[in-house]
Image: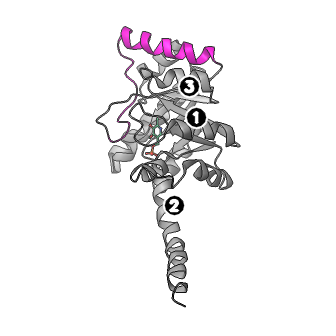
Amino acid sequence: MRLYVNIDHVATVRQARRTDEPDPVRAAVLAELGGADGITVHLREDRRHVQDRDVRLLLETARTGINLELAAASEVLALAVEWRPMQATLVPEKREEVTTEGGLALGTPDARRHLGEAVERLRGAGIRTSLFIDPDPDALRASADLGVEAVELHTGEYANTRGAERHEQLGRLRRAAALGHTLGMAVHAGHGLTYENVTLVAAVPEIEELNIGHSIVSRAVLVGLERATREMAEIVRRARA
Ligand code: PXP
């Protein structure tokens, strides 16, 4: 099992002030020191958090692999082909959404052709390609037909439900992971995973990579705030000493 840490929301905090801190490139170093097997960033068409400069520097400096999330339709595809990250994950993207809301639409021949063209371009550049999909048999079969190396199962519905409903969603993820494996694809998972809900997903044997972002960045703010305040308080008090 590999843990890929998504550092988009370090960039979200920086973009709130359009300054140069916190730098996601520095955050990646710390995530790697903490045991991350890879770093994930979503370069959105609207550049609301991660910027081109971040990806370029991450590709130069990361000791692990970079998983670049992108929409097939965006001009980011050309950048991915130029930059050649170790892995690209194609995701759906809507300007109005707060975060990725579901897996890729693979239901129509048009959608599959469109995605297939993006997959071909990434493959031509030697980039391992994954598709972010809902944990459904049709989506898994369509992904296998497109010849991708991996799929990332959307865990959002599992994360957003409770009790019997969550149990059902876990079963859905387990069946999808088994089918993906049988179809010869590597199975990844992510979205909405937290310190409280990750265990049952991490235990699914066919899942070999998890992408986790918001929960880790959220915890980092809390576990780091006490020390950050203490350091500022010391400077402020020392100024009058
Ligand atoms: N996987 C994909 C495809 C995503 O788009 C995201 C969010 O950017 C994640 C995983 C991580 O989700 P979260 O931030 O909820 O951990």
| Magenta stretch, residue numbers | 98-125
Q: Secondary structure at mark 3?
A: helix
Instruction: Tell me the kind of residue under disc 2.
Output: Ala
Q: Is residue 96 left or right of residue 111?
A: left
> What residue is shown with label 2?
220
Q: In front: 234, or 119?
A: 234
**Residue 147 visible in the picture:** no
Q: Residue furthest bottom?
A: 241
> What residue is shown with label 3?
80
Mark sitting earlier along the chain (2/3): 3
Does the CB distance between marks 2 and 1 fall below 8 Å?
Answer: no
Please tell me in which quadrant of the rendered image residue 95 appears. top left
Q: Is residue 192 left or right of residue 60?
A: left
Instruction: Give yes or no for residue 119 being in the magenta stretch.
Output: yes
Q: Residue furthest right?
A: 63
| Quadrant location, ligand no. 1 | top left
Mark sitting earlier along the chain (2/1): 1
Mark sitting earlier along the chain (1/3): 1
Q: Residues within 10 Å of mark 2 (few under 14, many from 20)?
A: few
Q: Secondary structure at mark 2?
A: helix
In the rendering, at what x and y percent does residue 205 appear? 60, 38
What residue is drawn where x is 63% and y is 18%?
125
Q: Is residue 46 above or below residue 33?
A: above
| Ligand 1 contact, mark 1 (Cβ < 8 Å) | no
From the image, state whether disc 2 or disc 3 is nearer to you: 3
Q: Is residue 227 above or below residue 43?
A: below
Instruction: Tell me the kind of residue under disc 1.
Output: Asn
